[in-house]
């Protein structure tokens, strides 16, 4: 499999260093929407989609005032998964599957750009997005993103353990190298997505954490503004804290086997993209 790391939505929230940990308080922070595009023998697979073309064109009606006010997305159509798939030389129709960490707008907004694709999501997440029982869920899940009738593939069963984590195996129609790993906390049915590259695993941890220092440093740390946002946005803080602890142990104990990254850390995104490009086989050899 050949893997591409895409930023499908630059976010510019206020707060500067309080949010992204870099220099300066009186500026906008910078975050990304880290999406994977995977070339497989069964077509292209997206892991998350970021924002979609309709989100960029009609942000006020599709994304909501809260998201626009807090995230301040760049709204560049060239950053959408649809346009980046085309820029890489593929057709949008080549995307046969989308595997979602969860259904927040900055992760699933682009599924409407691939209406023929099968959309893989945990059953608990699909139920939460459909029922919207909690005030946070009424705000975070936007029914407009699902009105086109996505071809859902939902999963409630669990498979064999993966490095000590519960795993959903055999995603329908996908190769066995792609797994969904339950990581509850940020949402009711949040998941990580693990990919066996043949030279080690990638784990896209979605919004299980937001800042590299939460997982990859001996003393966990997170900028205070970002920490407050995570506490506010999360649906189950106990589960979220538990899964972060387990991810830290995985990063420490399996550093040579598993590369972990989240959705929004721009430093992790650049590191993962550079690492994958350096270690990728030429396309003609992979074929």
Image: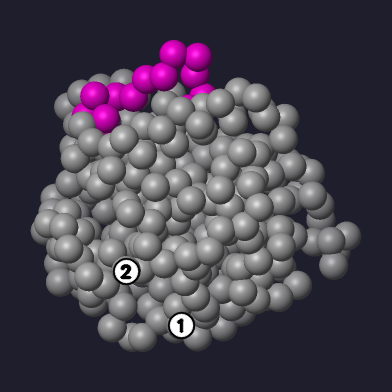
* Residue 245 is a magenta residue: no
Region of the chain picked out in magenta, as a range: 215-227
**Where residue 11 appears, x then y in whole percent?**
30, 48
Q: Which of the two residues, 5 or 75, is positioned nearer the viewer here?
A: 5
Q: Quarter holding the C terminus? A: bottom right
* Residue 222 is a magenta residue: yes
Is 147 placed above or below 248 here?
A: below
Q: Which of marks 1 and 2 is nearer the N terminus?
A: 2
Q: Which residue lies furthest to the top in this view?
A: 219
Numbered circle sitting on residue 151: 1
Look at the numbered disc 1 and give the secondary structure of its residue.
strand
Q: Residue at x 43, y 24 (%)?
A: 213
Q: In which quadrant of the rendered view does residue 238 lie?
A: top left
Q: Which of the two residues, 56 or 144, is positioned nearer the viewer here?
A: 144
Q: Which residue is drawn at 46% across and 42% down?
A: 262
**Where residue 57 appears, x then y in whole percent?**
25, 72
Principal SS element in the magenta part?
Answer: loop
For mark 2, what is the residue? 127
- The answer to whether any part of residue 89 appears in the image is no
Is 152 placed above or below 192 here?
A: below
Q: Quarter holding the N terminus? A: bottom right
**Where residue 264 appears, x then y in whole percent?**
40, 43
Is 205 placed above or below 126 here?
A: above
Look at the numbered disc 2 and give the secondary structure of its residue.
helix
Question: Would residue 52 appear left or right of 43 to someone viewing this image?
Answer: left
């Amino acid at each position: 499999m050949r893997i591409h790391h895409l930023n499908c939505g630059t976010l510019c929230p206020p707060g500067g260093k309080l949010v992204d940990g870099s220099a300066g308080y009186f500026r906008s922070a910078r975050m990304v929407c880290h999406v994977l595009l995977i070339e497989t023998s069964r077509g292209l697979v997206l892991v998350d989609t970021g924002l979609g073309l309709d989100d960029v064109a009609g942000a006020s009606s599709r994304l909501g005032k809260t998201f626009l006010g807090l995230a301040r997305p760049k709204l560049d159509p060239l950053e959408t998964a649809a346009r980046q798939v085309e820029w890489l030389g593929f057709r949008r129709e080549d995307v046969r599957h989308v595997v979602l960490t969860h259904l927040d707008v900055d992760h699933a907004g682009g599924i409407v750009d691939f209406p023929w694709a099968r959309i893989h999501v945990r059953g608990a997440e699909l139920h939460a997005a459909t029922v919207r029982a909690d005030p946070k869920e009424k705000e975070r899940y936007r029914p407009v993103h699902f009105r086109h009738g996505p071809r859902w593939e939902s999963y409630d069963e669990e498979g064999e353990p993966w490095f000590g984590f519960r795993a959903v195996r055999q995603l329908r129609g996908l190769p066995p190298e792609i797994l969904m790993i339950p990581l509850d906390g940020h949402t009711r049915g949040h998941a990580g997505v693990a990919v066996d590259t043949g030279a080690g695993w990638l784990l896209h941890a979605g919004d299980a954490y937001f800042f590299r220092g939460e997982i990859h440093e001996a003393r966990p740390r997170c900028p205070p503004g970002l920490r407050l946002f995570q506490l506010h946005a999360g649906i189950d803080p106990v589960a979220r804290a538990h899964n972060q602890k387990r991810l830290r142990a995985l990063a420490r104990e399996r550093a040579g086997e598993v590369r972990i990254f989240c959705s929004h850390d721009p430093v992790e995104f650049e590191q993962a993209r550079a690492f994958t490009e350096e270690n990728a086989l030429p396309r003609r050899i992979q074929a």
